[in-house]
Amino acid sequence: MISQIDNKTGALNERLEQISQRSVWERLTDRFYGYDYFISYRWSDGRFYAVSLCEQLQDKGFDCFLDSTDFGAGVNWKSVGDQSIRKTSRLILVGSPEVHASKAVSRELRVYRSTGKTIVPINIGKSLTDIPVSSPLLEYLDRDSIWIPEPISALDEGPSPPTITKLVSSFDLERNHARRMRFLRTTGIVGGFLLLLAAGAILRLWWNMPGKRTAEALGRLRASGLTIHRNTDDPYSGQFEIAIREPPAQFTSILQDLTTLETYNDVFSLDTNMSLIGDLAPFKPLVNLKELHVAGSDLQSLSELSGMRQLTTLVVAQNRQLQDNDFLVLTELQQLRSLEIDGCSEVSNQVLGYLAGLPLQRLWINSCRKIDIEGVELLANLPLTELRMKNTSVIINARLIQLVDELPSLRTLAVSPQDADPDALQMLKTHFKDQGYRLDVAKTRTDF
C-alpha cells in the first residue's frame, strides 16, 4: 500500500516537473503579462485535480500558474505569488473539502479580489455550497459569478470534459501568448530582451533595498534592548510585534528605525508601557499600525491616533486621566474591531456614542463606573461578539435583556451580579446556555 502511494506521488511530481518546463523568455514575460489562469488549491486533497486541470488547460493553449511549479529555489513565494495573482486574468478556486483550512488559499483569494477580477469556483462535492460559517473563504465567493460543479470523485479522476469546455468558452480575454507575439512584433526580440534585462536589474535593486533597510533597522532595534517577535499567526511573514519594556537610551534613533520598518509595513503591533515615553506623539509616524497596546499609563490625549487609520486593535486600559472628549478620535478609526478601556474611570456614556458605525466586535469597559445601561444601549446593532462590563453601573434587569436581544452576534458577556433582578438573571443564563456562548456574572475584584 505504501509503495502504491509512493508511486502515485512520484508520477504526480513528474507531471509537475513537465508543467514547469518553461523557456527563459516565457518566464521573463510572465513577470509583465501574468497568466491566463491562476489555480488556487489545497495541497493535501486538491493537488491531483489542480495538476490535471493545469495540464488540460495548457493543452488548450492557456498559460496557467501553479505555485508548486512556478516558484524557483530561494524565491520569495509570497511576493512572486502576489505579483502573479494581480496580473492573472482569471483565478480558479479548486473547492476541495479541506480548502477552507488553507491560509495560503485564503490569502490568494484576498489578493486577487482586490483587483476586481473574476474568481471561478469549482465546487467539488458541494464543498463550497455547504461552506462552513467560520470559513475565511466565505467573503470572497460571489454567487453571481461562474460556478462549476464537480462530483467528489473528481479529486481522484481529474476535471470533467464539461468543466474544461466551460472554462475555455467563458474566457473572452486576449490570451497571454497573443500578447507576447504582439510585443515581439512591436519591439523586436533583441530590443525586448535587453529592455527586460534592464527592467529586471532595476526591480532587483528596488526589491533588495527595503529588505536591506529592514534588516539593518531590526538589528539596531534588537541591539537597543527591544523585544521583537514575528507575527505569530504567520511565522513566514515579515511582520513584527515590538514591545518596549524599558526606557530606550536613544529614543530618536529608535523611532527612526521603527518608521523605517513601518514604511515597508513590517511593524503591525506595538506594545509599550507609555509611562516610559510620556505620550503618543513619538509614534505619530507609524500610520500603518494595526495593533497598539498602551495600557497602564498616564496619557493626557489620544489625538495622535487620528493618523493611524489602519488600527484594528486598541488597548488604552487604566489610563485614568483620559476624559470623554479624548475618545472622539475613535470615530476616525473605521477599521477598529477591538477596544479595551478598562479602568478609564473618568469616561462616561458619551464615549460609547462615539462607537456607532464602527465594525467593533470586542469591547472591554470593566471598572468604568460612570457607564450605565443608557450608555450601553448606544451599542445596539453593533457587530459585537464579546462585551465585558464588570464593575460598571450596569445592572442585570429587563433593559439589559432587551439590549442583549439587539446584539445578535454576541457570544461572550461579562457583567457584575450586584443588585441583579433574579428573573432577569435567569433569563440571561438561559440565553447563554448554548454551547459556544459564555456568560460571566461572578463577582470580581474592584481594585483597578
Image: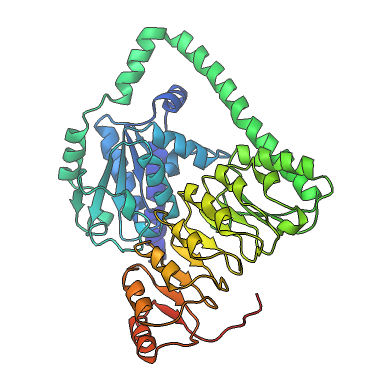
Question: Is 414 displayed left or right of 47 in the figure?
Answer: right
Q: Is any atom of residue 267 visible in this view? A: no
Question: Is 110 displayed left or right of 276 in the figure?
Answer: left
How many numbered marks does the figure carry?
A: 0
Q: Quadrant of the C terminus?
A: bottom right
Could you say which quadrant of the image residue 88 lies in? top left
Q: Is any atom of residue 112 visible in this view? A: yes
Nearer the observer, 381 or 220: 381
Measured as percent of width and height from the top left, residue 215 is found at: 70, 40
* 36 lies above or below 182: below
* 328 lies above or below 448: above
> Residue at (58%, 42%) from the top-left corner?
287
Question: Is 16 displayed left or right of 291 in the figure?
Answer: left
In the displayed image of the protein, which residue is found farthest to the right?
A: 249
Q: Quadrant of the N terminus?
A: bottom left
In the displayed image of the protein, which residue is found farthest to the bottom?
A: 422
> Residue at (47%, 88%) from the top-left corner?
419
Measured as percent of width and height from the top left, residue 6 is found at: 42, 58
* 331 lies above or below 193: below
Measured as percent of width and height from the top left, residue 10 is found at: 41, 51
Nearer the observer, 69 or 133: 133
Nearer the observer, 139 or 37: 139
Could you say which quadrant of the image residue 252 lies in? top right
> Residue at (49%, 61%) from the top-left corner?
350
* 30 lies above or below 285: above
> Residue at (72%, 44%) from the top-left corner?
218
Measured as percent of width and height from the top left, residue 258 is found at: 69, 43
Nearer the observer, 404 or 217: 404
